[in-house]
Image (cartoon, rainbow, N blue to C red):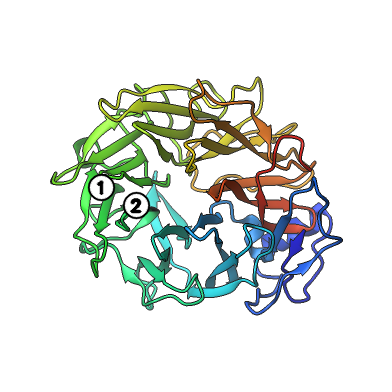
């Protein structure tokens, strides 16, 4: 196991102490960028899979929305990025790289720092304050690695979504470019994808028209800037889509742009995919399922997209049957008529935050989080933050299922690395050189950390 340790700070022991630290916000000190990873214990044995942990601050313990991201470049290098609350009015974006296919990671480096922007909205006559996170994204396209994030404007009057490129394996990044141009744009719930030729596709929600609407912008390979953004869907009667769920983006080999989001139509919050083929001036909308989930709330849980051959795959969460469950749907690109099913049917408990990755061999990998043991009662009302997990009360594990090329469907579901009493949330998945890697946030009695592991064979420790 590799651990990057923060400077000395108050102990993160016992559930009560953790709760106090989370409530206090920043009692845990800062995260420095020049610390080298140090081995924890002996090297892994021949059947063990290396596990890497990057500790977060005490203020991060109560954050349920930031998530780590992964990508791999054609040279087999693995990149990990995450954002952390490093001061009362500061978020910091970190990047770490593995040059040996996940054996070891270098010391995390600071790529960007941002102030904290707080938006205020009226909900049912009450003012609701929400902090905008950095929500990083990583994609590799040809010789470049692209890192995207959201940052507060210098005067804290709003936010902007940026992307920067590195041509030296993440050692340095060029000047960041803003991907949205419209007046009043406030990009949130973002996604970033790259096409095989280096084309970038960004998607997001923003409220420039006084409602959260879905937009997308393309930067053609070799172009210096993004083209003007296009609306993906303005919502029924231009009233917007589900306002608090991340979008997903994908670029096909022919340049077709796919953007998935949670729509809002007649009280139903179901996933839809906008499609724009090369040469077309607008996106066409394709519902993934018929109206299924009637809900007046904010799940903060968006879709994921992957493409295998001539088939488009979508994964998401909804609670049409009561408790939140993850679903998977697929459709031929020729008609986009989706067939949906539960990703991993379970008798009790909840699931969420499903992500998809298609490897070079055509195997589709799905990861998600799933409850372990008893859970605290869920609040079904309208809310703007998921409930903060409490160590010692239930737990969550990151799960995986894979659909090999040529197979009829997914294989057996299994936990990646479940730990009793730990909450594993917000997974990410990528692959390189035939290996698949999974990252997630993990909260336990010792604190919160970003965890990265190579996906071993069933039975690997």
Would you say 30 lies left or right of 406 here?
Answer: right
Residue 266 placed where, x, y %? Answer: 30, 28
Question: Element at badge 1?
Answer: loop
In the depicted view, which residue is nearer to us: 346 or 223? 223
* Identity of the residue drawn at 80% across and 59% down: 17
Could you tell me if residue 199 is visible in this image? yes
* Identity of the residue drawn at 47% across and 34% down: 316
Would you say 265 lies left or right of 124 here?
Answer: left
Quadrant including the N terminus: bottom right
Would you say 339 lies left or right of 418 here?
Answer: left
* Identity of the residue drawn at 25% across and 39% down: 275
Question: Element at badge 2?
Answer: loop
Q: Find disc 2 in the rendering and name its residue.
A: 196
Report, in whole angstroms, how far the alpha carbon at label 1 lies from the one at label 2.
Answer: 9 Å
Could you tell me if residue 135 is visible in this image? no
Q: Is residue 87 above or below residue 1?
A: below
The quadrant in which residue 227 appears is: bottom left
Q: Is residue 38 above or below residue 79?
A: below
Q: Find disc 1 in the rendering and name its residue.
A: 255
State how many labels appear: 2
Q: Is residue 211 above or below residue 90?
A: above
């Amino acid at each position: 196991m590799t651990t990057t340790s923060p400077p000395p700070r108050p102990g993160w022991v016992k559930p009560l102490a953790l709760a106090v630290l989370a409530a206090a916000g920043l009692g845990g000190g800062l995260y420095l960028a020049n610390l080298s990873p140090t081995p924890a214990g002996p090297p892994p044995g021949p059947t063990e899979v290396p596990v890497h942990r990057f500790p977060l601050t005490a203020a991060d313990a109560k954050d349920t929305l930031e998530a780590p991201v992964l990508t791999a470049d054609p040279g087999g290098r693995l990149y990990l990025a995450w954002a952390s609350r490093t001061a009362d009015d500061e978020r910091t974006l970190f990047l770490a790289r593995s040059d040996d296919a996940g054996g070891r990671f270098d010391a995390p480096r600071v790529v960007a720092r941002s102030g904290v922007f707080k938006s205020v909205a009226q909900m049912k006559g009450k003012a609701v304050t929400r902090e905008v996170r950095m929500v990083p994204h990583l994609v590799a396209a040809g010789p470049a690695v692209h890192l995207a994030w959201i940052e507060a404007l210098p005067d804290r009057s709003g936010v902007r979504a940026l992307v920067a490129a590195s041509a030296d394996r993440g050692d340095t990044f060029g000047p960041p470019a803003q991907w949205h141009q419209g007046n009043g744009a406030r990009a949130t719930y973002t996604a970033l994808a790259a096409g095989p030729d280096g084309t970038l596709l960004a998607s997001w929600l923003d409220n420039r028209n006084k409602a959260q609407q879905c937009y997308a912008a393309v930067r053609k390979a070799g172009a210096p800037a993004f083209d003007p953004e296009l609306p993906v869907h303005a919502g029924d009667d231009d009233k917007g889509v589900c306002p608090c769920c991340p979008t997903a983006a994908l670029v096909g080999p022919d340049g077709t742009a796919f953007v998935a989001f949670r729509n809002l139509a007649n009280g139903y919050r179901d996933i839809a995919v906008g499609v724009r083929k090369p040469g077309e001036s607008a996106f066409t909308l394709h519902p993934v399922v018929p109206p299924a989930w009637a809900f007046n709330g904010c799940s903060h849980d968006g879709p994921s997209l992957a493409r295998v051959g001539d088939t488009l795959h979508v994964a998401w969460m909804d609670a049409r049957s009561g408790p939140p469950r993850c679903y998977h749907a697929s459709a031929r690109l020729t008609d986009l008529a989706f067939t949906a099913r539960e990703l991993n049917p379970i008798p009790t408990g909840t699931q969420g935050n499903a992500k998809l990755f298609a490897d070079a061999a055509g195997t589709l990998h799905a990861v998600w989080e799933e409850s372990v043991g008893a859970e605290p009662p869920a609040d079904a009302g309208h809310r703007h933050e998921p409930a903060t997990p409490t160590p010692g009360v239930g737990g969550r594990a990151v799960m995986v299922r894979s659909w090999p090329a040529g197979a009829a469907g997914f294989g057996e579901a299994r936990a990646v690395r479940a730990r009793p009493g730990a909450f594993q949330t917000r997974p990410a998945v990528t692959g390189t050189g035939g290996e698949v890697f999974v990252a997630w946030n993990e909260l336990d009695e010792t604190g919160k950390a970003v965890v990265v592991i190579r996906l071993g064979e069933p039975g690997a420790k």
